[in-house]
Each structure stands twice: as C-alpha cells, then as structure tokens.
Amino acid sequence: MSVQPGTLDPLDFPDPLEAIKYVMEQKGLTVKDLEPMIGRSNRVYEVLSHKRSLTLKMIWRLHKGLGIPAEGLIKQPQERQSA
C-alpha cells in the first residue's frame, strides 16, 4: 500500500519513527507490511522501539512505499524521556 509522496509534511513529525507509526495507524498497516521496506519483523520492531537506526536503504524504501518525505525520515530520532 502506498500514498502519494509529499502528502506528509516532515515538519509535522518531531521524530521519524512517529511519522512511520502515524502512517501505519492511518493506513491500518502491520509490522508485516513494513518488512519489504525495513527487513524481517524483528528488525522492524527494533527500529520502531529505537533500538536500531534507519539505514539509507530503509529510508528510501519507506519514502517510496509510504510516501513519507525523506527529509522527515533523515531527522535524528528524539531520545525518549525517562519519567
């Protein structure tokens, strides 16, 4: 499933992973749907939990597959705040 590139403004998301999660939620996508763009499900989970960084190849595939602007995916993920 893909959307038109440029449908999301990279400034709308403080974190590239939030952009991915947002698109997943909006399109009803699962981890399995991200496997062609990121890799096996364990790698998808590692990326979504901030345990693994996005590679350039992943960024390009996510941009093409989900329509997330590459500029938004290149941003440095924000560190999680500990309570």
Image (cartoon, grey):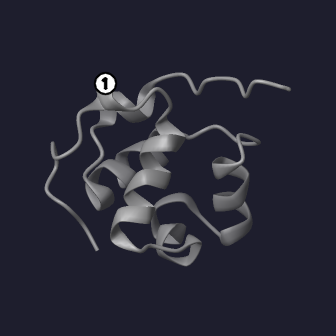
Figure label count: 1
| Rendered location of residue 45, percent (x, y) | 70, 59
Is residue 38 placed above or below 35 in the rendered structure? Answer: above
Q: Quadrant of residue 1?
A: bottom left
Is residue 48 placed above or below 53 in the rendered structure? Answer: below
**Which element is circle 1 on?**
helix
| Rendered location of residue 55, percent (x, y) | 54, 40
| Rendered location of residue 47, percent (x, y) | 65, 49
Is residue 43 placed above or below 82 in the rendered structure? Answer: below
- Residue 3 shown left or right of residue 24 in the figure: left
| Rendered location of residue 13, percent (x, y) | 40, 32
Viewer-side residue, 79 vs 71: 79
Can see residue 57? no
Q: Farthest residue in the front direction?
A: 83
- Disc 1 marks a residue whose amino acid type is Leu
The residue under label 1 is: 11
Q: Residue at x 27, y 38 (%)?
A: 69
Q: Quadrant of residue 9?
A: top left
Q: Quadrant of residue 61?
A: bottom left
Can see residue 41? yes
Q: Quadrant of the C terminus?
A: top right
Viewer-side residue, 5 vs 82: 82
Neighbourhood count class around disc 1 (C-alpha, 10 Å): few under 14, some 14–19, many 20 upward: few
Q: Residue at x 53, y 42 (%)?
A: 17
- Residue 60 shown left or right of residue 56 in the figure: left
Q: Residue at x 36, y 46 (%)?
A: 60
